[in-house]
Amino acid sequence: MQASTVSSPNYASAVILLRQNTDPGDPEVFLVRRSEKLAFLGGFSAFPGGQLDTSDAEVHVSNSVDAESGAAISCAARELFEELGVLVARGAESLTKGQRVSLRDDLESGRMAWPELLRHYSLRLDGDEFTFVGRWVTPAFSARRFDTWFFLVNCPPKQEPNVIPGELSSGGWIAAGRAHEQWRRSEILAVPPTLHALKTIAEGLTPDLVERFLAIPQAHREPVRRIEFRPNYICFPVRTPTKPPATHTNCYLIYNSQEILVIDPGSPYEEEQQALSSAVDDLVREGRTVRDVILTHMHPDHVGGVNSLREHLDGRVKVAAHRFTAESLSDPIRVDRLIEDGDIIELSGSPRIALRAMHTPGHARGHLCFYEEQTGTLISGDNIVGLGSVLIDPPEGNMRDYLDSLRRMRALPNLSVIFGGHGPAIANPYSRLDEYISHRLEREQSILKAVKEGARTSQEIVARVYTDVSPKAHAMAERAVLAHLEKLEADGHDFSDQEGWHAR
């Protein structure tokens, strides 16, 4: 099986809005929280911004470097106005607050396009008001990818940002250092460019501010490999021959001052194995040792790099997994230590990190999740993913077990984030779990209805029930149908015989 094709990023802009007349040693930024309902980074703290619109390039921007940067500035100005009502344009100072509200409504409702609005009110965009501080590219593990221009912008006098709930749930002024400290205390989730901006601004509005912003390669479109959504939890996506739409499997490096846990080193590709080994080496050079390599389950895209990493570490590291996973991987991957439900894996050193193992079968018989109660962090493997859907494929997969596992995860207290086996972190864990459970139960009822109405084969059921699924995925859908039918039989529905499925 070949790895899936990585999607090309769309162009976007983001605005780091600064409050004027604040202490330059403790500057304030306007930080927003994205709605939990958004498919892309729902629940994350971020800066206002969004995707480039075709009309953005129609706007003339004075003092811009070229047409591309001009379009990015136009996008930044439009998104800032749409999301916060802040209009950064020459001539905007003559507008009243009421006029700006009316213009924002015209733009949001589609009564007036962005270029038309600027022309009609004699407003002009000036590139000198938008300081470029980097372009960041979304890592390849995400289905939605962006090449985002970041701009520093001073909030105009007499304009106050105002979040209208929708794509954004809230927002407010906060000292950059305080916001970064909230992340350090695991109180908010943020992506690397947001964290880099907060940390850089917290160091002060010094003359070398832009230079500090641009001092790292990731600010020049080099994709991030180490993604630390939460302190001490590094998500390191590695390219694997996984099922579409995913192209990567998330390996997690959990560390403190003394030890490292490596969860699911899944890539069979030498280049990816070397990149992961290098990331582990960086943590080891700071005085840590690798305690264990832990496997959530036995599927190839989660275990493909185990032997390579063990060899890189001179065979010193032990591999740990559930006993069912160990049985499936007896050759060629040796499991040295068994993990059972309820086992506590605590790292020596500071901060205290104690992961409670949860045996959560359904996707695989030996599937394990790991819950860290202090911060409400759940490493879910392939039970919950940030990209795509979860295949329950009998006989290894079992739908009844899977739903029980989902309900058990839903009952966890203080759950704040889910780190899945594929895609970005999930910042709305309870609503996502509710969606998973309700979706499976709705499918089940649709399948039962199809059988009662005369569908006899898996193909006939898929044709009636999976109308929202591409024909290319029908083979996998048939396996999911089988899992649902087996669950229905286990629940007491008697409708199978040697000639096909039918209700009795």
Image: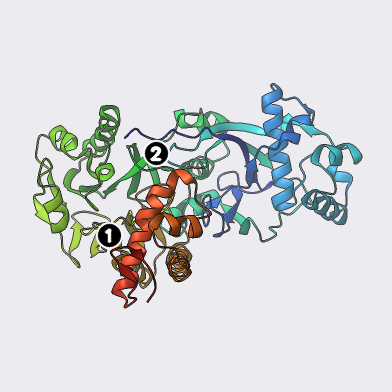
Q: Write the residue at 57% across / 56% down.
A: 33
Residue 358, percent from left and from top = 24, 64
- Which residue lies most toward the front here? 499
Mark 2 residue element: loop
- Please provide percent x and percent y for residue 100: 83, 51
Give left or right: position of 413 versus 333. Answer: right
Question: What residue is shown with label 1?
Answer: 370
In the foreground, 365 or 157: 365
Asked if disc 1 and disc 2 are in contact, CB closer than 8 Å, the reply is: no
Q: Is residue 272 visible?
A: yes
- Could you tell which of marks 1 and 2 lies nearer the N-terminus? 2
Q: Does dot 1 land on a helix, a strand or a loop? A: strand
> Is 203 on the left or on the right of 123, as rendered?
left
**Whole-percent x, y for residue 40 in the image:** 53, 49
Q: CA distance from mark 1 to mark 2?
A: 23 Å
Amino acid on which disc 2 is placed: Thr
Q: Residue at x 73, y 42 (%)?
A: 78
Mark 1: which amino acid?
A: Phe
Q: Residues within 10 Å of mark 2 (few under 14, many from 20)?
A: many
Residue found 42% across the figure and 65% down from its top: 440
Residue 273 sits in quarter = top left
Give the foreground label among 1 and 2: 2
**Outermost residue to the top:** 66
